[in-house]
Amino acid sequence: MTNPITQVTLKNGMKVMLKEIHTAPIISSWIWYRVGSRDEPTGKTGISHWTEHMQFKGTKKFPANVLDKAISREGGRWNASTSHDSTRYYETMPADKIDLALRLEADRMTNSIFNEKEVASERTVIISEREGSENEPMFRLGEAIQNYAFRVHPYHHEIIGDMADLRTITRDDLYTHYRTFYVPNNAVLAIAGDFETKPMLKRVRELFEPIPRGITPPRLARPEPEQKGELHFSINGPGETTFIQLAYHFPNATNPDYFPLQVLDSLLNGASGLSYKTSRLYRALVDKGYAVDVSGYSDASIDPYLYRVTITNHPERKPEEAVAVLDAEIKKLQEELVGKDEITRAVKQARAVFAYGSENITHQAFWMGYTAMFSTYDWFTTYLNKLSRVTPQDVRRVAQKYFQPSTRVIGIYSPKGKGG
């Protein structure tokens, strides 16, 4: 993690980040585009995710039916994903085979084929994916939380998009989206692994620098107005389990309060799941029979997003009882200073989660590009130091500031099945 990186901006505006790691004969290459569901206007929700799917339909040089075979034959693996803030593609290959990945990404930055039949086929796939998700309680509950928490900001909708838009987006809509955002000056190429920087940079320049710079893509700027009071809702659906989700409006990743809030998360939930059975909420809710399970999480986002706590309700308890217990635990954090030993333990857990998520070559390349979407690589390299500087006073202050009922949304999912 301490290896230095080389950062270069090509003549066409594409940012390149290179990190030599000579622990294994592997190279991982990630290309990131600054476009995600936050960039989608009403009527085009889900278009970023759908465009990502179309990138696997091939180019003239790399037809779809040979792509998977080519990567697999060389011993590599590849994938892609779309988030609220970005879209990314990666290939992790044996070091002497990485040129295939670089040639592929340079080609599909400009030459992807958006065939009408493939668009129609993928529409069916994505609509089926959406319909399948709608049978899942946590998807229904999570989507409703977003709908209530964001009225103005495009974080309002799920990454997969709204069904109405998935039925009406056209091939030309997709291609326009692709040509607008898939330009080198809107991309970051992050490569980590067993290579020498000088020849790697030379090859990157050969492949990517001839691609013309595009117009700087527009990004939606629709700040969410302050929530004026607590919002409650309930929904019904299949299953036999009641779920509760509470979402608090949460600062973005570059806000200084983001780091004490990560420590607070570790106190409440055990640092995104690590040692969660010793966390405050698990002991108060699960050990005492108010819930079957509890977890919490947040995202590192460009704009302020949400911190969510999800409770699997105990079948013999009312949801309101679990919420009251959670409120009592939060009130303790707001009124009492947490002991230094507990803070130290929480920081240690948060550091461990961070370390586990950045230990291999693929993860190293991921973090280089990921942080470039909302900040700089310094955000990654200084993360642990910022956690270690968090004090009990910091934790109490952010608990008081962000964990107020007036800034939260509470949703309850009630099953239609047995006992629903």
Image (cartoon, rainbow, N blue to C red):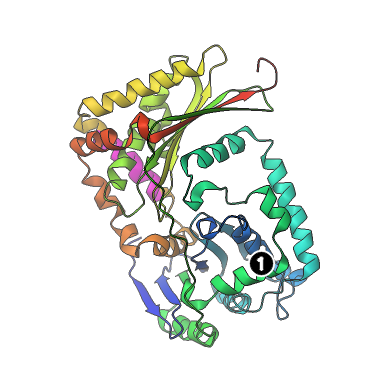
Crowd class of label 1 (few under 14; some 14 to 19; many from 20; radius 10 Å): few
What residue lies at 67% left-to-right and 74% top-to-bottom? 112
Assign the N terminus to one quadrant of the image: bottom left
Q: Looking at the picture, does residue 188 appear above or below residue 342?
A: below
Whether residue 285 can be seen here: yes
Is residue 184 shown left or right of residue 332?
right
Q: Residue furthest top?
A: 316
What residue lies at 44% left-to-right and 80% top-to-bottom? 13
Q: Main secondary structure of the magenta part?
A: helix
The residue closer to the viewer here, 23 or 195, is 195
Whether residue 194 can be seen here: no
Q: Looking at the picture, does residue 402 appear above or below residue 56?
A: above
Is residue 401 shown left or right of residue 160?
left
What residue lies at 62% left-to-right and 51% top-to-bottom? 160
Place residue 380 in its image quadrant. Answer: bottom left
Is residue 115 shown left or right of residue 98?
right
Identify the residue under disc 1.
Answer: 173
Report the amino acid beneath label 1.
Answer: Asp
Element at badge 1? Answer: helix
Assign the C terminus to one quadrant of the image: top right
Q: Looking at the picture, does residue 145 appear above or below residue 32?
A: above
384 falls in the magenta region: no
What count of labels does the image hold? 1
Q: Looking at the picture, does residue 301 appear above or below residue 234?
A: below
Which contiguous range is marked in magenta?
Answer: 343-355
